[in-house]
Amino acid sequence: MSTTGTHHGNETRIVADPDLPTILIIREFDAPPDRVFRAYTDPDLVVQWLGPRRLTMRIDQYDARSGGSYRYVHRGDDGTEYGFHGVFHEVRPNERIVQTFTYEGFPDGVSLETAVFEDLGGRTLVTGKSLMDSIEARDSMLKSGMDHGVREGHERLDELLGGQQGDGVDRDTETGS
Amino acid sequence: MSTTGTHHGNETRIVADPDLPTILIIREFDAPPDRVFRAYTDPDLVVQWLGPRRLTMRIDQYDARSGGSYRYVHRGDDGTEYGFHGVFHEVRPNERIVQTFTYEGFPDGVSLETAVFEDLGGRTLVTGKSLMDSIEARDSMLKSGMDHGVREGHERLDELLGGQQGDGVDRDTETGS
């Protein structure tokens, strides 16, 4: 009932822990957990929002289940490609995703990414955590401009979730194969 | 040339970083990287050394390639079972293994494990790193008695690598499928 209408104040918070090599990414969305979770796991939806607007996303593989793998490429107007890949340690429907993440420009760098979905009564709180193996690696990630891409991606996800009727995002039903 | 004979002083060093939620596990073995790497990735060999002597190991799955998964169970004399599972983010032959790790008694706990194999001229230095998301989780891991199991496992691996003739550990040849 309270999921319709625009909730003002959706804002992405990006927090670098002072003592741990982590980045917290905290965001609320105007949709219940099952719809937000599906937007994070169905590649036909992921490709519509993940990353900044100026890059085109191509998904080579996105098998979002425990033990699955993924790879995708973001491509700029000048043809530059940025590849990313990893494995899904756990995909717990509507609750939790744990995956590894490597930017292929730095193939020895690996982070462990956890996203937790919490039901706020029709709205969803998503808390993401990126864990790296040094404060320096974490600070490099922050300085890469990832914050802009994350925020803009979340705005695009708002738009995707808001366009319920025609965008293929089902409510409360599972139609995926 | 220098790989034969017993090298005294193989000792497992387990180091808790004072500032980061990591455990370093450092060990040399009297065998070249390809043989040590194979003992870490071939389930028929892994089952012979991983963990303390008092537990029996059963491997349900051990697909040690990039994107593969694993699960194994350690079982005590009293029938108590300890399950572990995860995914392999990267398996780079004779060089590097990056995998996730969960003890199923604490299913929300996930660590990121990296093992790097370095050639010391016939001997191999293996540097393992476990990365957790808090100092408390890291300290709990240390207090679990894991250090005893790790050290005893390494002694069993010494024995496996030392018995070259009859244990199925090939030298410098690949016979696996």
Image (cartoon, coloured by chain):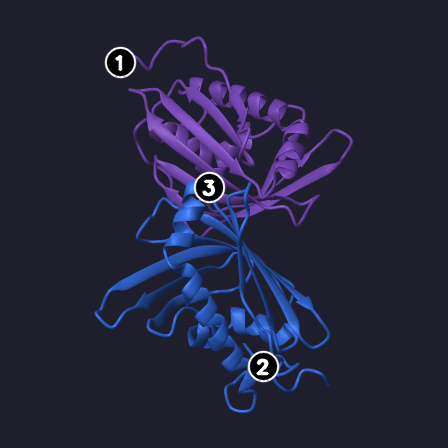
Chain colours: A blue, B purple
Relative to residue B51, is residue A109 depicted above or below?
below
Tell me the subunit letter for badge 2. A
Q: Which residue is mark 2?
A: A175
Q: CA distance from mark 3 to mark 2?
A: 42 Å
Q: CA distance from mark 2 to mark 1?
A: 63 Å
- Tags 1 and 3 on a common chain: no
Residue at (33% x, 71% y) in the render: A55
Q: Amino acid at mark 2?
A: Thr
Identify which residue, A53 or B113, lies in the foreground: A53
Element type at mark 3: helix
Tell me the residue that label 1 is attached to: B1
Give the mark, 3 or 2, whose residue is nearer the N terminus: 3
Q: Residue furthest left?
A: A78
Q: Is residue A7 visible?
A: yes
Q: Indicate left or right for A119 with B35 as reference.
A: right
**Other-residue count near label 1 (Cα within 10 Å), few / some / many at <14 / 14–19 / ≥20:** few
Q: Nearer the viewer, residue A30 or B88?
A: A30
On screen, B63 above or below B53?
below
Image location of residue A61, percent across then percent down: 40, 66
- Viewer can see residue B170: no
Residue B29's x, y, as percent?
42, 20
Q: Nearer the viewer, residue B171 or A13?
A: A13
Is there a contact, CB below 8 Å, between mark 3 and mark 2?
Answer: no
Number of numbered discs present? 3
